[in-house]
Amino acid sequence: MAGKGKRMRPHTLTTPKPLIPIAGKPIVERLIQAVSVACPVPITTIGFVVSELNAATRTQLVAMAQRVGAEAKFYGQSDALGTAHAVYCAQELLSGPVMIAFADTLFRGDFVLDMDQESIVWVKTVTDPAAFGVVKTNDQGQVTDFVEKPTEFVSNLAIIGIYYFQDGTRLKQALQTLVDEGVRKDGEYQLTTALEQLSQQGMQFATQEVQAWLDCGTKAAMLHTNRQFLDLLQEEEVLIAPTAHLHNSVLIPPVYLGEQVVVQNAVLGPHVSVGNHSRIDNARIQNSIIQSHSNLYNTNLDSSMIGNYVQLRGRSAVVSIGDYNTLES
């Protein structure tokens, strides 16, 4: 969680990207829930690597861990020195069975983690492997090579950013070696470099493939992921909070409404998520994410993201508005 989320600005100026909601829940909470479902044993500890941590964020993350029965621990990464360095910052947790997950990774999978494997890389088949780190595998599904953004086709199994180690101590040792020897690529310590070293030392990496891998890196990607989750969740969850109030309004499913949301004289949907305590009046909104405590009046929005505590009146457009802004026209 230590990244700056520059591609998601202005929304990440005040909120860490993993805490931006998808279908009403923060990205990282949906990740925690998905990993806990796939894990055959209870998760006891969740380590969060952060660049900075205020009291509100800490409380939020502690509650997320507690909801899956785990204790939250926090580790600082003051300088963005790469993915391997981020994991290295939480080195005290690297012993026994360990999972590593990038906090902005969302996936859907119908499988159970195979803890009998020495290590596992979670992957997804993609159409454009040149844009990702990929793994080459043998006929048994064991990884034979890690390749970062291949210029020629070597594999279409993209690494999604979730890993399992039966004994995290070996990973800890590999990370320590990178840091001690200053082994960097493009100025950063890369996790794939550590994985390559472990593979060369004889560690066997299996693969498990997810059914869906959902990107949250940009506004367009975030809205696409919100659409996909709403489509999936309408068959699994109640998306309208019992304290939400509708007056003279129409919802075109799927729509998520949080606690104490008020919708009046409006048409919402499809694919709209509205956070807690927001109010929408005299509006037509579709394919958009509206966060908490925001008020929207006399507006027509499509493919838009509205932050927390926003006041928006009289605008028909595709917009991206960060927290604590007021716009009137």
Image (cartoon, rainbow, N blue to C red):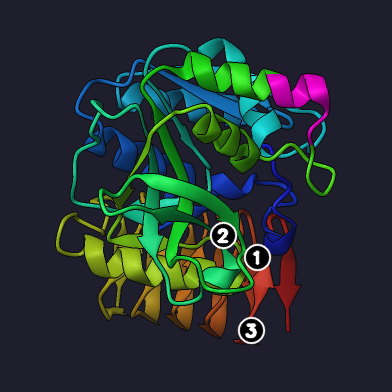
* Residue 151 appearing in the image: yes
Mark 2 or mark 3: whose residue is earlier in sequence: 2
Q: Amino acid at mark 1?
A: Gln
Residue 169 magenta:
no
Q: Residue 237: where, in percent of width, then height? A: 19, 54
How many residues crowd around disc 3 within 10 Å: few (fewer than 14), some, or many (20 or more)?
Answer: some
Residue, far left: 235
> Which labelled disc corresponds to residue 314?
3
> Which labelled disc corresponds to residue 311?
1
Q: Residue 273: where, in percent of width, then height? A: 41, 65
**Residue under the image location 23 percent in, 51 percent down:** 242
* Residue at disc 2, secondary structure: loop
**Residue under the image location 41 percent in, 17 percent down:** 167
> Which labelled disc corresponds to residue 4?
none
Q: CA distance from mark 2 to mark 1?
A: 6 Å
The answer to which quarter of the image holds residue 297 is bottom right
Q: Residue tagged by mark 2?
A: 294
Give the left or right position of residue 316, taking residue 120 as reference.
right
Q: Are marks 2 and 1 in contact (CB under 8 Å)?
A: yes
Give the left or right position of residue 109, taking residue 166 as reference.
left
The answer to which quarter of the image holds residue 50 is top right
The answer to which quarter of the image holds residue 209 is bottom left
Q: Which sits in the foreground, 228 or 293?
A: 228
Q: Which sits in the foreground, 36 or 229?
A: 36
Residue 180 magenta:
yes
Q: Main secondary structure of the magenta part?
A: helix
* Residue at disc 3, secondary structure: loop
**Residue under the image location 36 percent in, 49 percent down:** 259
Please provide the residue range marked out in magenta: 177-183
Q: CA distance from mark 2 to mark 3?
A: 14 Å
